[in-house]
Amino acid sequence: MDFRKVKELVLILAVFCSSPNLAVSVECSETPTEYKTHDYGDLLFSLESSCVKTLSQKEQLFVAGLSQRILETCSFPSDPASRLVLTRFLSSSAFVGVIGGQYGNPDLGRGLQDQAQSMSIYSAGAATLDWIGGCNPHARLIADGVVHYLRKTASKGPNNTPNYVEGCVRYYSGKYTEEQCQCIADLGRAIFPNIHQTDFSPKSIKRMIEANPFVGLMVGIQCRVGDY
């Protein structure tokens, strides 16, 4: 793919849209024709422009597969703080990429179909590094865009809107810290992409375990949460 025609536009958009002074919801510009040849072209362009909104679970899987490959191959992002944010996201998303997000579905056929689809999407994401041309400025922009997305969607919303982390802290009232509740949400987003903007319920942790027991195990180990 030849990115030269859109490189300048993307770089300008990335700098502009990632400014911390901008509102959370930044409108995406029209996707350039060069990107539309890829099944996830709109998503790729929006990540480079840092204007992406909440992703679906399948879109997240694609992003996780691509981000994991970029991190391993290109070492993007380079700063430790961004890597920490990305690594937590990738750690739980990788398990969804292996066994899907419907492990506990009583309909075995649907569960197996979801597993196969999840593996395919995750692999497609990893293969996309070759499509964008390897470890070039676009790979760096995408890595930075993913971190921007993770931070943006995990931030506190306006007053009187649901916030999972705050609700978790209130519910457990000293039993679990804000850091632990943030950890639950950050890992749980692999199952529920918009979890940070939802009301907390202890049943949500149970649903994570039912959807993917490995994600549930990570919540227990990484977040030090055993009794919910």
Image (spheres, grey):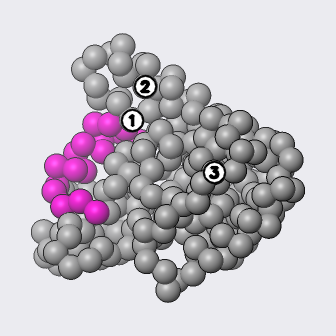
- CA separation in Å, label 2 and label 3: 29 Å
Residue behind mark 2: 114
**Does dot 2 land on a helix, a strand or a loop?**
helix
* Residue 56 in the image: above or below residue 156: above
Q: Residues within 10 Å of mark 3 (few under 14, many from 20)?
A: some
Q: Residues within 10 Å of mark 1 (few under 14, many from 20)?
A: many
Q: Is residue 198 visible?
A: yes
User: Magenta segment, which residues?
Assistant: 197-218
**Magenta span contains residue 202:** yes
Residue type indicated by callout 2: Asp
The residue indicated by pointer 1 is 101
| Residue 24 occupies quadrant | bottom left
Quadrant holding the C terminus: bottom left
Say if 179 sits above or below 201 in the image.
Answer: below
Q: Identify which residue is drawn at 62% across, 35% down.
A: 39
Q: Looking at the picture, which amino acid does disc 3 mark?
A: Thr
For mark 3, what is the residue?
31
